[in-house]
Image (tube, grey):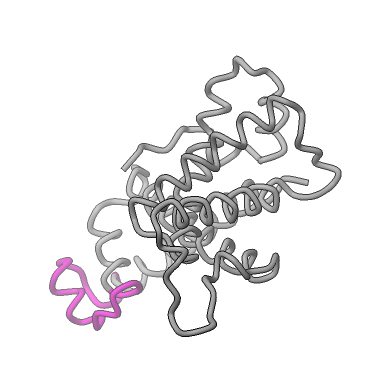
Amino acid sequence: MTSSPPVWTTQTTTALLDALRDTANQPAWSQVEFRYRRVIAALARRLGASESDAEDVAQQTLTEFVLAYKQGRYDRNKGRLSSWILGIAQRATLQVLRRSGRAAERPAAGETLLAEVAGEPELRTIWTDERDREILSRAMSMLRDEAAIDDRTLLAFELVALRNVPAAEVATQAKMSVEQVYVAKSRVTKRLRQLVGELTEAFEQDI
């Protein structure tokens, strides 16, 4: 997995857009790619693309975004960056599906692919779902990198909170008391919520 650029947690999308005005600012462009690539690919899969096609969609979407932004075609006063990217990703998904022949496939007679008929509300729901998955993944990765939370505490949290393993069993595996397991769960949950909140705020400040 690609390592997280250090400013991802604090760089708002608005700040990134300002930085992108300098076309030579490669770190800013890398931030945009890092933030959106996996979400775009996940969106494409939800719209019917295969794993490999979804990666093509992400690349095509980001390439088109870079070109359009450098040409001054994005006006933040007309809408959110994510809405613009959603439109590009939907078109790119259809292009890739048609190129691969999958757009000719139908689940049943008379039905169409979701990528062809999905409107802004439906696309926004899918986008938000996949964005939240990505944010949680990033937050968990950041937790694992934090020296303040030791491996045993994190293990106890993952077992009891994420895998629903009984606390007594977790205590045995992590070599902790049951009370320590619940303390670990509470401590890590609090920090995880904080990280998720910071990431979500940064991600959504694009208007």
Does 50 lie within the magenta span? no
**Foreground residue, 70 or 143?**
70
Count how many numbered circles sit on residues in the image: 0
Q: Can I make out residue 191 in this image?
A: no
Q: Is residue 73 left or right of residue 201?
A: right
Residue 70: which quarter of the image?
top right
What kind of secondary structure does the magenta stretch mostly adopt? helix
Residue 35's place in the image compared with 135, above or below, is above
Q: Position of residue 76 (x, y in %)?
A: 80, 41
Residue at image x 45%, y 84%?
A: 108
Q: Position of residue 150 (x, y in %)?
A: 28, 51
Q: Is residue 69 left or right of residue 158?
A: right
Q: Position of residue 147 (x, y in %)?
A: 34, 42
Instruction: State the quadrant of the N terminus.
Output: top left
Residue 154's place in the image compared with 36, above or below, is below
Residue at image x 73%, y 28%?
A: 18
**Foreground residue, 67 or 201?**
67
Q: Which residues are magenta?
A: 160-180
Q: Is residue 61 left or right of residue 184?
A: right
**Foreground residue, 21 or 64?**
64
Residue at image x 20%, y 82%?
A: 168
Residue at image x 52%, y 43%?
A: 35
Q: Can I make out residue 119 in this image?
A: yes
Residue 143's place in the image compared with 112, above or below, is above
- The residue lying furthest to the right in this view is 77
Does 168 lie within the magenta span? yes
- The residue lying furthest to the top in this view is 24
Q: Position of residue 136 (x, y in %)?
A: 45, 59
